[in-house]
Amino acid sequence: MASILDSVDQRTQLVGENRLEILMFRLHGRQLFAINVFKVQEVVRLPKLTQIPQRHPHMCGVITLRGKTIPVIDLAQAIGMRALVPDENSTVIVTEYNRSIQAFLIGSVERIVNLNWESIQPPPRTAGRQHYLTAITRVDDSIVEIIDVEKVLAEIVPMNTKISDEKLSNPLFSKAVGREVLIIDDSKVAINQLNDALTQLGIIVHQATDGLRGLQQLKYWADQGEIVTDKLLMVFTDAEMPEMDGYRLTTEIRNDPRLHDLYVVMHTSLSGSFNAAMVEKVGCDNFLSKFQPDRLADVIADRLALDED
């Protein structure tokens, strides 16, 4: 089964083309779910599961895989469905998010599908599970629900958003008070994490939930006669988003003379060396893995230091 992901490294060129690949799977019944392939390390039969005391209700236990101890999360239960019952035929998806490795217990794997981000849409507000979805799409006339894994993980292990006193003591941050930034991300959890940290620096936050809306907001300010590079200290963009990904967004920003000099930070839970290469290719100014409040402070300080030169 792991062979389904053997060529993942060869697919990284899709990231700069507003395309992605999703791994589709089922939890219960016929409904299809998915996550981005780039966050998947492998798909395997469930190894021996070890129970741990006082574990979170959504955790099944831990497994040992390739010398690493990895927590196993019941993905069905985590998004509000009835729990899965693990056995020797169970399947787990091993993933890496925010520099941590975890496995998700699922029902069965379907296949990998190559899509354009323009075909990925925000979930309808009436969707029962929209609380745990970042997007939906349609494959072969079937609706596929793309899970907000960041929210699932944040509910199990809440992220720290506090910037350390040592970082806050930097005198440069006096120049951050009242400055504005635009956060572009389809995950409410990620937006809230950034917002919590940035407000500690007195920074005013604007938000957009996908790359297309973010670009439209930037162009709207420019059309209104605002000098956007003066208005905004920087733009934070996720990599993977409905309608337009962060790489295409950055390219569009660089192609617009009114926006060209904006300071753009790629802020993503995606892992892998391809990120650094793609960030350089499309012209981002900095890269920040989710979620590191002190590293965020360093990025802000780097940007403020440019005004001192």
Image (cartoon, helix red, strand yellow):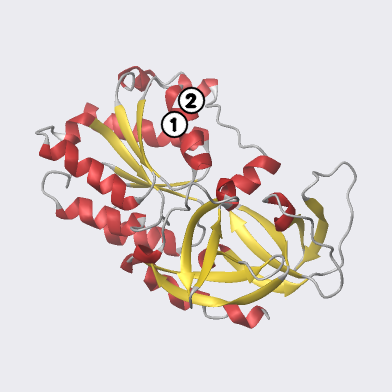
Count residues near mark 2 (Cα–Cα under 10 Å), then give few for <14, some for 14-19, many for 20+: some
- The residue to which callout 1 is attached is 297
In the picture, measured across the screen, residue 81 lies left or right of residue 143, that is right
- How far from the left and from the top, in percent, is residue 41? 61, 68
Relative height, residue 287 to residue 197 (above, below): below
- How far from the left and from the top, in percent, is residue 50? 88, 58
Pointer 2 or 1: first along the chain: 2
Residue contact between numbered discs 2 and 1, judged by CB atoms under 8 Å: yes
Viewer-closest of 170 and 265: 265
In the picture, measured across the screen, residue 285 lies left or right of residue 95, that is left
Q: Residue at x 46, y 69 (%)?
A: 138
Which quadrant is home to the C terminus? top left
- How far from the left and from the top, in percent, is residue 305? 29, 30
Relative height, residue 64 to residue 223 (above, below): below
Outermost residue, front side: 126
For label 1, the SS is helix
- The residue to which callout 2 is attached is 167
Dividing the picture into quadrants, the one containing residue 276 is bottom left
Count of marks placed on residues:
2
In the picture, measured across the screen, residue 195 lies left or right of residue 106, that is left
Q: Residue at x 55, y 61 (%)?
A: 145
Q: Residue at x 81, y 57 (%)?
A: 62
For label 2, the SS is helix
**Amino acid on which disc 1 is placed:** Ala
Viewer-closest of 275 and 238: 238
Count residues near mark 1 (Cα–Cα under 10 Å), then give few for <14, some for 14-19, many for 20+: many
CA separation in Å, label 2 and label 1: 7 Å
Which quadrant is home to the N terminus? bottom right
Residue 98 showing in the rendered view? no
**Amino acid on which disc 2 is placed:** Lys
Dividing the picture into quadrants, the one containing residue 54 is top right
- How far from the left and from the top, in percent, is residue 46? 79, 70
